[in-house]
Image (tube, grey):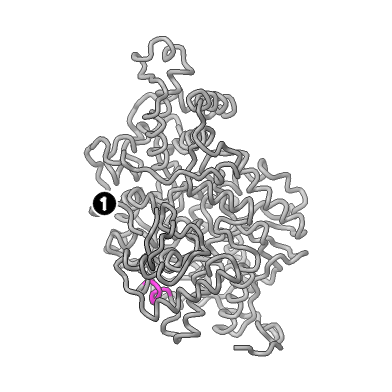
Amino acid sequence: MAIEANGKTFETDEEGYLTNLGEWEPAVAEVMAAEDDLELTSEHWEIINFLREYYEEYQIAPAVRVLTKAVGKKLGKEKGNSKYLYALFPYGPGKQACRFAGLPKPTGCI
Amino acid sequence: MAGAEFETPELSEHIEVPELVEGTMEHITCFVAKPEHQTDLGFPGEKVENWKEVAIDKMGDLLSRYRSFQVFMDACVKCGSCTDKCHYFLGTQDPKNMPVGRQDLLRKVYRRYFTFAGKYFPKLVGAVDLSEEIIDDWYSYFHQCSQCRRCSVFCPYGIDTAEISMAAREILDSIGVGQKYCNEIIGKVHKIGNNLGLPGPAILDTLEGLEEDVYEEDEVAVKYPLDVKGADILLVTPSADFFAEPHVDGLIGYGKVFHEAGVSWTLSTKASEAGNFGMFIGSYENMRRVSLRIREAALELGVKRIVFGECGHAWRIAYSFLNTLAGPFDFLDPDYPVPQHICEFTLNEIEKGTLEFDKSENDDMSITFHDSCNVARASRMGDTPGGQFEIPRKVIKAVVNNYHDMEWDTIHERTFCCGGGGGLLTDDLMEVRVKGAKPRMSAFKNVMEEKGVTHLAAICAICKSQFTKVLPYYGMDMFQVVSVHQLVSNAIVLNRKTPPEEAPGYGEDDDD
C-alpha cells in the first residue's frame, strides 16, 4: 500500500502505517487525515507534534496518561483527558494519531 | 482505518439461539505474520513448499505430545450440547463457529491421516484430504475462537475447543502461516520484554508520572518502583497497565494497596509483561521463553513473592502452568502462594483490617463484574473452590456501595467472553469482535436497565480494551469500563503519610 502526499509516494503497511518512519512529513498526516474524513486543526497538530517528540526520545508512543497530562499542562486542565483526545481522534489517540504522526502502531492488549 | 463494513447485531432481552446461516464469516481473515515475525519465534518465515506433509507431521507430533488433544479428536459423539454455547456462533449464525463445527475442521483431517476408518473408508467417517481450502478455513475459523472454554463447560466429555484452536494455530505456524497480531507481539516480548514494546526508560517515565499524579491528588508519596533489588514482592502486570485506560487506573490502585499494606514491592523491566501470547498460538516453547523472563527477574531482584496484576490469560498461565514452565520457585517465601493474584493480596489486607475505604467515592457508579474466561474457567484463586469468582467480588463490594451481578447464566463458569480474547484483539478482526461481544453486551445492557448498573468492572487487560472498543457499537459509552483496582484506588484512604522529602521531584529545580 502507499499514499501520495506533496507529490511524493509514501509506502504504508497493510494497516495504513508509514513503513519508513524517517520519511514522514506534515503532508503525510494531512493526507491520512483526509482519508479518515478529518481536517487537521492546530489542536490536532499539538498532539501529533508531541507524539513525534516523545517517540524521538523513548522509541515508543506515549502512554495515554502521559499524553493527557502533557496536553493538560500545555492546553489547560479541561483538555487533559481521553475524552478530549477521542473527540480529536475518534479512532483513538494511540492508534489514529500515531498513524498520522508516522509512528508504528502500538501493539498489545490495548 | 475502518475495517470492512458490517452490521452490529441487535441486542435482545434473552440470548436467543439463532438460525444457522452457512458461510456468514468465511470472508474473515486476519493479517498474516511477516517473515521476521515468524523467524523470531522459531517458525518458517513463509509458507513452506511441502506444507501438506509438514502440517500432517505436526499434527502427529501434537497428538503424541498432548494426550488431551488425541482424546478431544476421538471423543466427540455429536450430542449437540456445545452448539449454542459459543458467543461467536450466537453473534454470527455461522455453523463453523459452533464449537463442534470448529473442532470438525481439524477432526476431519485427523480422521483421514490418523484413524483406520479414515484411511480406508474416508467418506464413511467424514474424513477429508488436507487441501489449500482447508488451510484457509483453519486460518479463518481458528482465528474466530477466543479460546474461552465456555463450550467445554457444557460438553459431557469435557472437550476443550481452546486446546484444539491452539493446536490448529501451531500447525499453521509450523508451515509458515502465522498471525501477525500474536506473533509480532511475542517477538516484542522476546526482544524488549513486553507486548507493547515499551523500553525501560518509557516505563520509568510513565511510573514517575503516576507518582506525581498521586502526590498531587493525595499529598502522599506512593511509590511505583522499577527494578528495585531486594524488594519483597515482584509485581508482574500486563504492559497495557502502563499504557492504556482504564488499565493504568488499576495500576495506580495496586500501588496504593501496597503502600497502605506497608510492603516493599517492585516492577521489573525484564518481566514487564504478565501476558503470554505463546499460549494463544499453542507454542509451548514460546510460552516457556516468555515465562522464564519472570523467573530470571525474580532471581535477579531477589524477591520473596510474585504477585500478578489484572490480566486474564496471564493468571491462567501463572496459576496453572508457571511452575512447570519456569519452576521450581523454591527460592520464594513458602508462606505465600506462588504466585498470588493482586485481588487475593488486596482481599487479605482487607480482611486483616489494614486498609480503610471511603466507599462513597464510588457512589457515582453502580458496578457489575465481568468474569474473565481464563480466570473463571482455567484457574482458581485463594484457598477454596470458586475463589476466582468470590475474591474479586468481595474486593469490589468492600469498596463500592452499589453492586449487582449480571444474569446467573452469564457469569461465573458460564461467563461470556468479552469477544476479544485469545489473540483476537486486533482491528483486522473487528467484525468478529463486535459480533462475538453480543451475548456479553446483552447481559450488561439488561443489568443496566433492570438494576441501574452504570459500569462494568474487569480484571483482564484484553477485556478492558475490547469493551472500550465494542461498547460504542452497541450504543453504550467506552468509558463504562473500569479496572477493579481503579475502584479500590478511588475509595482507599491513604493513612500512611510520607515525609516531604519523599515527594516526587523534592529538591529538584522546577525546570518547566
Q: Is residue B271 found inside the magenta-colored segment of the image?
A: no
**Horizontal side, residue B239 vs residue B294: left or right:** left
Q: Is residue B94 left or right of residue B105?
A: left
Q: Residues within 10 Å of mark 1 (few under 14, many from 20)?
A: few
Q: Main secondary structure of the magenta part?
A: helix
Q: If the image is split into quadrants, where does the C terminus of chain B sit?
A: bottom right
- Position in image of residue B12 (x %, y %): 23, 53
Q: Position of residue A92 (x, y in %)?
A: 40, 66
- Residue position for label 1: B6
In the rendering, at what x and y percent does residue B83 appear?
32, 35
Q: Is residue B257 above or below residue B1?
A: below
Q: What stretch is highlighted in magenta?
A: A82-86
Res B466 → quadrant:
bottom left
Whether residue B460 is visible: no
**Which residue in the rendered view is the most extreme toward the front?**
A7
Closer-to-camera residue (A1/B64): A1
Q: Does the magenta stretch include residue A83?
A: yes
Residue drawn at x 45%, y 22% as measured from the top left: B110
Element type where label 1 sits in the image: loop
Mark 1: amino acid: Phe
* B252 left or right, relative to A75: right
Residue at the image position 34 percent from the left and 33 percent from the top: B81
Q: Nearer the viewer, residue B412 or B68?
A: B68
Number of on-image labels: 1
Residue B121, x across and y down, in percent: 38, 11
Which quadrant is home to the N terminus of chain B?
bottom left
Q: Which chain carries label 1?
A: B
Above/below status of B256 relative to B512: above
Quarter holding residue B105: top left
**Viewer-proximal residue among B266 and B220:** B266
B34, B161: nearer the viewer: B34
Q: Which residue shows up at 71% across the image and 56% down it?
A: B297
